[in-house]
Every structure is written in structure tokens, then in C-alpha cells.
Image (cartoon, coloured by chain):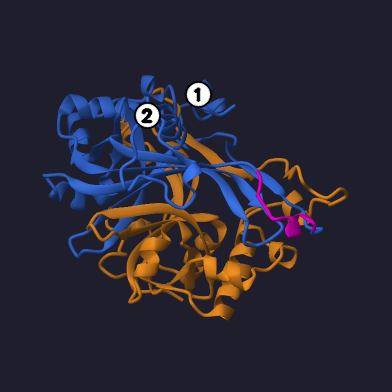
Chain colours: A blue, B orange
Amino acid sequence: MSQAPTPRTRVRRIPELGVYDRDRVHAILDEAIYCHLAWVADDGDPRVIPTIHTRIDDTLYVHGSAASSTLRAIKQGLAVAIAVTLVDGIRFARSMFEHSMNYRTVIVYGEAQEVTDRDELAQVFDAITDHVAPGRSADARPPSDDELRQTTFVKVALDECSAKVSEGFPEEPDDDLALDVWAGVLPLRTVPGEPVGDPLLREGTEVPAYVADYRRPGQR
Amino acid sequence: MSQAPTPRTRVRRIPELGVYDRDRVHAILDEAIYCHLAWVADDGDPRVIPTIHTRIDDTLYVHGSAASSTLRAIKQGLAVAIAVTLVDGIRFARSMFEHSMNYRTVIVYGEAQEVTDRDELAQVFDAITDHVAPGRSADARPPSDDELRQTTFVKVALDECSAKVSEGFPEEPDDDLALDVWAGVLPLRTVPGEPVGDPLLREGTEVPAYVADYRRPGQR
């Protein structure tokens, strides 16, 4: 299933990198733990914050408590841009000019609506918990009504979004290929370290498998 | 040296996390490879893209070619917000509500100015090359005049910026501490893999030490 690009989702600079396939967009959204949420504040200037997100079908949910004063004030929908970025490596070229990153990114545009329905909020809590650590929602205590009220989630329909995927090796002219300069890709990966138990952990509480064997969806 | 927070850089939600110390801000900007740049487009809606940056003293330079149609159109300075984020781990709490990320982020606000001076452009090319891979600028071919003309960098003074640092373990009420649920921190790190040479690499070209032993400034 694919989506026609709109004027602002069309990837302009290097058109062949644009990806409008829904499954690839979903895979990037699901693999990335966090995103950057941008909006225009009342003063007309841009704001951007890092926050976590989760996807349920074709809706992106974003944790908005750090921006809740803005987000809650907007009842009619707040125009947002959301970037989700995975860096896969550094592309070393023989010229400074052709250096680049290998990465996958999704940009989503839309009107953010606050999630106010209690059941939907509870469902998003489960989903975002499992987004950060698949399997965790079965163990962690679900939110109380009070905690639900203290939490801001906003949702954006995945109607206007596109992925950009940059991969492979540098493309350089013959003059540069003749240079005696190393070129290639240094892969970069985000990996878990050893889990560190909370100092107040009850004695005998085991590290669950989804922590000990942590990996992101889509990663080997 | 510290900076007084402005209304928009003051960290509102969890005030004790706000960091206005210039050295800590610099360290986060220098360790992160890339950033997210947000601005308000002509249509009044927000835009955000991932891009790379570098710092020279108290000026942040951002590679803007992906947004160059917007950035070049603005000769008087474009209001931007730039987020630089390092994720250090997942903080597992006994309740879903107290789950969080350990992270360090810097948000910079300012007026972006295109870099038009040829010498400054060349200096930024060196700096951003070494930002991505410390040591690389000594080996890679410097940009030609043509390449300088094709590249957009914008700069923002680091006058209005703040860091937010979230670290440590979850703080939970006694009722939750009594639950038999694992809690703690799963550290996350971005690590290099094995360098992959370009298929067109000249025979006998060695992998340089700054690639083979790659690490970010500030990382052990």
C-alpha cells in the first residue's frame, strides 16, 4: 500500500530516496524508540522536543507531557511535524563534500489531537510501554485514573508522511576515486548494555527476558 | 560559566532537570552526531528535519541543504529551534506511569543566518567533517569553490539554549516498591560496527585509526 506524496512530503533534494510505502514507514516508526515533535508556539516561533511515540495501525501517538501547556491549550488540533530518525552509519567519501550519513527517517505532518477518551488512553499506555520495551505491559502496573489524568498523549493520523532512506556507498567522480583516501561505511548501532537493577529492588526479583535480551523490532 | 534561562528555555515540567551550564551544553552538542532542525514554513506550519551540526566556540552550525529552499529564502534570519538528543537508557519502573528514558538533550533557539563568507564556509566544512569523525578533515579532499557554492550551512548563536538531563532510577511510592516487578535501567549506547570499505577503494588503502577506533567525544 502506498501513499501519494503531498507537496511537503515529497522528498525534494534527492528524489530517489523518497519512500512512500506504508509498510516501510511503519517499520521505521516501530523500530525507533523516540521522535522529535515540532510545532509553532503562540509567539509564532518554532518549538521542538524529543519525546516517545507509539503507533497503533495508522495513528501515531506521541507523549506530550513536556509540551502539555501548549498541547492542552489547542482543542481544535495543533499543526505538528514529527521526525523519527534512525542513524545506520557514517558514509566516508574521499571528498569532504560527499560525506554523508546512512539513515532512515520518517516525517509526519498533521493536526495533533489530545487523547481524552479513558479507554483509548489506557490502550495507548499499554502500546507505548510495549513500544519502548516489547512485553513490558504484561508486567508493569497499569495507570490509575489519577495517572491517566496527569498524562498527555496526542495523536496524529498517518495520512501525510514519508520516509527517506539513505544507504550504500558514496558516489564519487573519477578524479576522487583515484585519491588514496579510505572510503566506505562505518555502521552505527544502538545496543543495550547490562541491565542495572534499581537499588530498592525486592530481593529475588529476576531480570525479565525482554530486558536481558532487549532488541528493537526489525533489528537482528 | 552559566546562562540565565529565558521563558522558553526554562525547563518547566521537572525544573530540577534543567541545566544552563555552558560546558555541559557544549559537551552534549559535541557528543551528538546529528540534530533536528525545526522552523516555520511560509504556510505557517512547522517543519522538522534531521541534519548534522557542528559547534565552533559559541556558534552552532547546521547543514541545511535538505531545507535550502526555505533557508536560502530567508535573508534576515529565520527563527529556528534545534534539538540535540542523546539517549542513555530506558528507565523501567514498576508502574507504567513512572517509566521514562534517561537522556541528555539541548534545545537551541535563535535566528539562523546562512553562512556566505567563503573562508567561514571552508572552516565549517573542516569542523563538521571532524565533528562526524574526529581527524577526518586531515585526509579528505577539501571542497572546491563549486562545492562550497552548492552547500548550505546556517549558523545560530548559542545565546538562548538549555540542556535537560534525565538520569538515575525511577522514584516510586511505597505501594509500588512493594510490587514484585523488576525495575532499573537498561543502558543504551550507539556503537560502531566493523568498517565496510567502498567497493571502488584503491587496493592497499588502509582503514584509518579514527575509523577503526571510532568513538564519540565524551564516550569511554
Query: Horizontally, is A99 left or right of B203 in the view?
Result: left
> How many C-alpha atoms fall within 10 Å of the one at disc 2: few (<14), some, or many (≥20)?
few
**Marking on residue A2:** 2
Q: Is residue B89 visible?
A: no
Extreme residue in the top direction? A138
Q: Which residue is mark 1?
A: A210
Q: Residue at x 42, y 50 (%)?
A: A12
Residue at the spot 21% in from the left edge and 43% down from the top edge = A111
Count of all numbered marks drawn on residues in the image: 2
Q: Are marks 2 and 1 in contact (CB under 8 Å)?
A: no
Is residue B150 or residue B125 the one in the foreground? B150
Q: Disc 2 is attached to a residue of which chain?
A: A
Q: Quadrant of residue A138?
A: top left
Residue sitting at x 39%, y 74%: B159
Estimate the x, y position of residue B189 in percent, counting from the top left. 57, 43
Percent across and percent down for residue A141 are 32, 25
* Secondary-structure class at tag 1: helix
The chain identifier of the residue carrying mark 1 reads A
Real-space CA distance between mark 2 and mark 1, rounded to the nearest whole angstrom:
33 Å
Q: Which residues are magenta?
A: A169-178
